[in-house]
Image (cartoon, grey):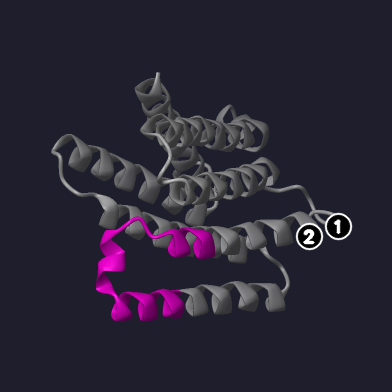
Amino acid sequence: MFDFFIYLGYFVLTIDLILYTYSFFRKKKANVFFVSYLAFSFVMQFSMEVMYHLRMNNLFLVNIFIIGQMILLGLFYKSIFNLKRQKNFVLISIVVALLILAVQFIIDWNQFLRFNLFEITLTSLLVVIFALIHFYNMLTESKEYYYISIAVVFYLLTSTVLFLIGNLTHNLSKEFKFLSWQLNSILLVMYYGFILYDWKKNLSKDVAN
């Protein structure tokens, strides 16, 4: 059952990438940074899966993915913000976060080869803040990328909590820790599903035109 949700997540991500890429290149509708994020996610997920089956340590790819996710989703939100101060906030936040992580890696390079909870928490919370700013903007603006932002807030917050719980309870049974990974795989399917639903609501009508 665990493998089912993992591969279902990969499948939905692939569909997302195909549809958003089509909307970008053929209809010029999809956001370039969001399409780049989906392509980046696809490549990283595929690479991590291959390394896992080859019994290779893929945690450095996890760290690259987490940092890349922050950058690309940050640039995505920056591109749809209208206020200059909000755009500047995103850029400054990303730069500061990268500097903080650079200092951590310089002090202890092995952190880049481990499951880095500090990195996960920092980058996830930043992206959640960007999404919440977008929700605030939607009070007076059009509800563009509404379901994507719901997915971002819900998934990043819940997955971060699951990772933190899993780490804090490392002395508990393997079954309990495995359950947290199972829940995360289900959340990931829901995350990509919301992204697909946003395409259906806002971009699918352009395909028929």
Would you place residue 98 above or below residue 17 in this image?
below
Is 77 inside the magenta-drawn segment?
no
Query: Residue 191 at what x, y percent from top left?
Result: 55, 37
Q: Amino acid at mark 2?
A: Asn
Q: Give the alpha-carbon distance from disc 1 to disc 2, as whole Å.
A: 6 Å
Question: Crowding near pointer 2: few (<14 within 10 Å), some, many (20+)?
Answer: some
How many marks the image carries: the answer is 2
Magenta residues (range): 98-123
The type of residue carrying mark 1 is Thr
Q: Would you identify the image quadrant in which residue 124 lies?
A: bottom right
Q: Main secondary structure of the magenta part?
A: helix
Above/below status of 203 relative to 127: above
| Residue that appears at 48% across and 61% down | 70
SS at badge 1: loop
**Residue highlighted by disc 2:** 137
Viewport quadrant of the N terminus: top left
Residue 197 % position (x, y): 61, 31
Q: Which residue is mark 1?
A: 140
Give the number of the disc on residue 205: none
Does 108 lie within the magenta span?
Answer: yes
Q: Are marks 1 and 2 in contact (CB under 8 Å)?
A: yes
Circle 1 residues within 10 Å: few <14, some 14–19, many ≥20: few
Q: Is residue 26 left or right of residue 3?
A: right
Residue sitting at x 62%, y 78%: 88
Which quadrant of the figure contains the C terminus? top right
Return the residue found at the far right: 140
The location of residue 76, given as percent across then percent down, is: 55, 59
